[in-house]
Image: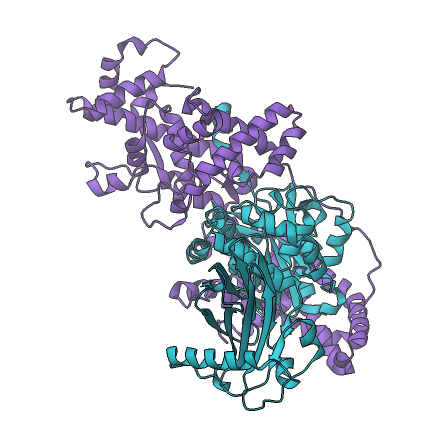
Amino acid sequence: MGLVSRYWILVTIDSFSRCRNDVIKSAQDFFNEQFPELTNQTEIPDRKIQRQLMQLYQSSDPRSEMAEKCLRCFISNVLKESCMALERKFAEKHYLYSTEILPLVLDVAQKKSPSTKDKEESLTTQILSTFNPNKSNLSTWVTIIFKTYSAVKNTLKEHGIVQLTDWTILRYTTHTRLKQALSNLQLTQTEITQAVKLLDSFHQVYCTQLSSYRKAKPDSKFTTAKYPQPTKEQLNQMVEIVYGEKIISCEEFLEELQKLATQLRENWTQPKQKKNQNNDNHEKVSKLPDYCIEPFDNCLHQSVEQVIQNRCNYIQRKGTQKGQQQANKYREALSLFHCHGVALKKIASQLGFTDQPHLSRFLKLKILREDIGRNLLLNLKKYVAELSGCSQSPDKLLELDARIQNMFGQEINKLIQEAEKEAKNGHRLVMKSRLAQSICQFITRYPHCNH
Amino acid sequence: MTNFITDLTNDLFEIDDIQGIINLETEQLQQAVLVSEQINNQDRQWQVYFQCLTLFAFEEWLCQREPSLTLHKEESSTLKHQYANVIDAVCNLEIGDFKVCLIPSMLLMNGEVAIPRAVIDLPEYAAHFYIVIGVDEESEIAAVKGFLRYEQLVNIKTELQPETDWNYYIPLAQFNQKVDELLLFLQCLAPTAIPLPEIPSSRENILRRVQLGLLNLLPELNNRPLWEVFTWEQGTAILTTPLLLNWVYQSINQNAVTLTNHLSDLLQILTQQTVNVGVWLADRVDDAVQTLSWQLIPAASELRSTLPSNSIEELEIILRDIQVQEEQLDIPATAIRAYQDIQLDELLRLYAIIWSLPEAENGWTLLLVLKTINENQSPSRFRLRVSDQIGILDEQDLITNNNNYIYTQVEGNYDDKFITTVISETGETQVFPAFEFIRE
């Protein structure tokens, strides 16, 4: 890594949300003047350059303004690289593209000089104003702030990606878990005892001082970490607890903690093992007797109505206008999908969702089908219990319960599976499954919420 | 570039089931902070905060998926300080007639789930369903990760040993991760289909057995978790006795002698036979009364007793004297009067006068008088202490000269029990069985 041009190429976002790279000639000239020896070198001493630029930037030297330009260029490059890196890792599985994040983090390209307000609110300014060249190099600092920036955090979260920091891991680790994890790694007893001491000191100092991070701070969009890196004072306190006197520096201690967290990380995030749920019993699917079809359909319609209505109520539970708009969008999307066979991707753009995953997270179709299935079973039971007067006898009711489960359980599974299969089909036709049709009927009958 | 990607993304974690994610709202996060700040034990605040997030997330999930089910959280352990102080789970929650217990865990962790053995092994806390809730505080999201029915959990548990921290560690993979089935059960199953164990009637025996150990160790707990100090048997006694849990919570950040004194009184109240003065009122000369060494004095109007009349007259004089000092004090004629002579460093007499308060106040009162019997001795000092289940109510010193007496009056409702202790200067102690008033 390490291109000198990162100090004079500025990456910005234009008015069409596109990313653009501009060579800032004045910055380039300034940079070459300050670091003439670098022109032909392949190894770039970033740390040294940044220290020097920061010194100039923070001084009252007339060169301060140019130093700031170079630093801002560098930051913008690292931000862009970070977005690209996320795309590379998460595009395929999580539909995360750099085009979604770049506009959140980069400054907007402006012909005139930006207003002070814009400057104050920019992520670049925040990074620059909190950077300490003696503590880390600038690219590390950029990525740390980048990942805790609320807009980035929220977007990642929307795509199902969340950060698990070393400090969260250590906070949640108990003695028992620590010992289990470390003996799995075959550490010696002495090493484990030392690790326990380390963790204890961390808990003692760090965890009692956390509550200030729990209170919502309205203007804290840049520092949203609930478990921030321990401060120097905290580290010094921990060193004193573990070693009595100061025989190691707080930087060394920080590294010890980070090493411990890394050891625990693997143990924590082992892939989920799916339990064999014995789903593969291919039982013969029997056909529902004729006399059952009508009650089944009635209960199905009833369940569809209940579940969709519940969902609408939930979306607009706060009584806000936004909630109501969302609820209407929900119905419209359901209608487009189930009655008109429109593909999710198209619905998403038609109704103003960022992308298809965004719409899917909103519609939660899988959960909708499951909820309908479950309520269907419940309604059938109520229906049959009323009919047979079983509700007075718990034993009879239990027996009935089992029989209904037997009789309708498969039918309901079939219903859901059909609808699912149909929904997956990319070349959309109007949906024909009974569940889809029932949803369509209901939505057509009551196109507005609060019918 | 590869290094850069690794460095940037190595602490990012991917969530599989994104549709099942519950977003925690700002109000819920703030509410959790508020609740956690109310607990008077700094070491537990974070745990309570985490439990609140668990509880609110589950409530949100239920509301989203099946609004017909209502969660009753008023009695939940998390919202009661004495329980939240010692239990790392949200128990005593109810959905309809089902009891549920929420197990807080990390959303991003798929290894083992820690379940406090108290919520499985003690019927007081047992639930029909144990539900693992994963919370990610950093991203303010949560998910229902899995659940087990009581009998399934008990089955799994038989092959496990609890760790020294009084937790069972159970792999998440052993939980039913089809959480929709939980909703189905909650909606369609009868609670009787999952029988829960009865609370054993032998709880008091355990308490009696470990009483001495508790008296010695509880004052030394100093905010440490129970498992660091007690055996599981001792822990069982504490966890199944709400009054002891109250005591533990009260004792946080203090180590006063009064607390230890009260502990000894409390353990007496909990383990020793009590005197039901309600019986005295109904049947004046009862066998039980004799065996507990109290001598009943008939009211002044009905002098048919064979008792030495000096006690009757003496009490009359003292009561008149007290009523002069306390103008408000109105001792009804129906009040029960009793006395007991005790030998500590000197021969002492304790009078107990008991009556019901007017109907509207719904309670009863106990007036105690302590005096010496032999007047011609060098003065010495005795301490009279009265406690109820919650704390020490009064302490007074008697100096035995000049025919002195001391008195104290306590009031309570019909659930209250009062225990009296007299201690001599040399530390000789006489504890009287606690008084209780069970109305016929």
The one nearer the camera, A96 or A70, is A70
Residue B239, percent from left and from top: 63, 56
* Number of callouts: 0
Q: Is residue B289 above or below residue A123?
A: below
Q: Specify the quadrant of the image occupied by residue A14.
A: top left
Residue A403 shown left or right of residue A359 in the figure: right
Work out which quarter of the rendered image holds the C terminus of chain B and state it. Answer: bottom right
Q: Colour of chain A?
A: purple
Please, which residue is most extreme toward the front here? B376
Residue A262, percent from left and from top: 55, 29
Residue A40, percent from left and from top: 34, 8
Q: Is residue A226 visible?
A: no
Q: Is residue A152 above or below residue B87?
A: above
The one nearer the camera, A238 or A14, is A238
Q: Is residue B65 visible?
A: yes
Q: Residue at x 49, y 41 (%)?
A: A96
Q: Residue at x 54, y 87 (%)?
A: B300
Q: Residue at x 24, y 37 (%)?
A: A110
Q: Residue at x 59, y 61 (%)?
A: B430
Residue B308, percent from left and from top: 60, 80
The one nearer the camera, B39 or B272, is B272
Please, which residue is most extreme toward the bottom here? B301
Q: Is residue B392 above or below residue A306?
A: above
Residue B260 shown left or right of residue B96 in the figure: left
Residue B80 shown left or right of residue A231 in the figure: right
Colour scheme shown? by chain
Q: Colour of chain B?
A: cyan
